[in-house]
Image (cartoon, rainbow, N blue to C red):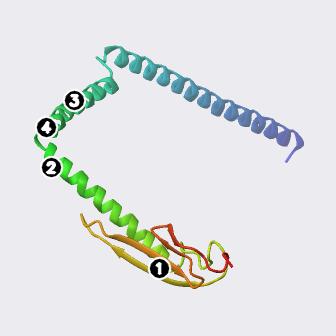
């Protein structure tokens, strides 16, 4: 093989490579242009749909909800008048049950030692002697909660009943 053949072969291969590269570049550019055109058409289509749409979906949904809530409010208002006695009875029952529940929680705290101090509030001696509880249920008014210390101090329903003997000495 002669040097001139090798030289011309290399030049032809470089020219073919550059033409292939240019061809691929043209294909990519044409795809980009086609994508841009497609997006422009989609934008125009969406604008046309937006202009042709009647009303707002959100406004329609809110109007339906307001109408539904007004109807429900009217129904509840009518039910309020017919069931006023039943509602007042249930409110009384609820308040009694709440009162009993709170009292039972206090007793549980006292019995577990979480609320009653083991120390006399006057002489600070660790002498808790007794805790007694009597509770009425649903209408009964019995409520006694007695805490006695060995020093003589005692409380009934968190009110002082007797004095501490160690402080008065």
Query: In x, y percent, where is residue 15?
Result: 75, 33
Q: Looking at the image, is 97 positioned above or below residue 167?
A: above
Query: In x, y percent, where is residue 59?
Result: 32, 23
- The residue positioned 61% from the left and 31% from the top of the image is 28
Q: CA distance from mark 1 to mark 2?
A: 37 Å
Q: In the figure, is residue 138 to the left or right of 157?
A: left
Label 1 neighbour load within 10 Å: few <14, some 14-19, many 20+: some
SS for tag 3?
helix
- Is the residue under label 2 in contact with that under label 1 (CB below 8 Å)? no
Q: CA distance from mark 4 to mark 2?
A: 10 Å
SS for tag 1?
helix
- Is the residue under label 2 in contact with that under label 3 (CB below 8 Å)? no
SS for tag 2?
helix
Query: In x, y percent, where is residue 106?
Result: 44, 69
Most foreground residue, 116 or 59: 116
Most foreground residue, 19 or 127: 127
Which quadrant would residue 65 be assigned to in this image?
Answer: top left
- Is the residue under label 4 in contact with that under label 1 (CB below 8 Å)? no
Labels 3 and 4: the sequence-earlier one: 3
Labels 3 and 2: the sequence-earlier one: 3
Query: In x, y percent, where is residue 19?
Result: 69, 31
Q: In the figure, is residue 144 to the left or right of 38?
A: left
Q: CA distance from mark 3 to mark 1?
A: 51 Å
Q: Looking at the image, is 148 positioned above or below residue 51?
A: below
* Residue denoted by label 3: 70
* Residue denoted by label 4: 81
Q: CA distance from mark 3 to mark 2?
A: 24 Å
Q: Which mark is residue 111?
A: 1
Label 4 neighbour load within 10 Å: few <14, some 14-19, many 20+: few
* Residue denoted by label 2: 86
């Amino acid at each position: 093989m002669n040097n001139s053949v090798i030289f011309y072969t290399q030049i032809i291969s470089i020219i073919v490579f550059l033409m292939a590269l240019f061809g691929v570049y043209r294909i990519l550019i044409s795809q980009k242009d086609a994508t841009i055109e497609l997006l422009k058409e989609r934008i125009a289509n969406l604008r046309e749909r937006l202009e042709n749409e009647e009303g707002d979906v959100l406004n329609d949904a809110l109007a339906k909800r307001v109408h539904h809530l007004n109807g429900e409010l009217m129904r509840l208002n009518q039910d309020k008048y017919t069931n006023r006695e039943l509602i007042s009875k249930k409110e009384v029952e609820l308040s009694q049950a709440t009162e009993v529940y709170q009292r039972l929680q206090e007793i549980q705290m006292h019995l577990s030692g979480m609320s009653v101090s083991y120390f006399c509030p006057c002489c600070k001696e660790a002498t808790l002697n007794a805790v007694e509880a009597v509770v009425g249920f649903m209408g009964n008014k019995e409520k006694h909660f007695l805490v006695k210390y060995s020093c003589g101090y005692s409380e009934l329903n968190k009110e002082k009943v007797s004095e501490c003997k160690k402080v008065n000495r």
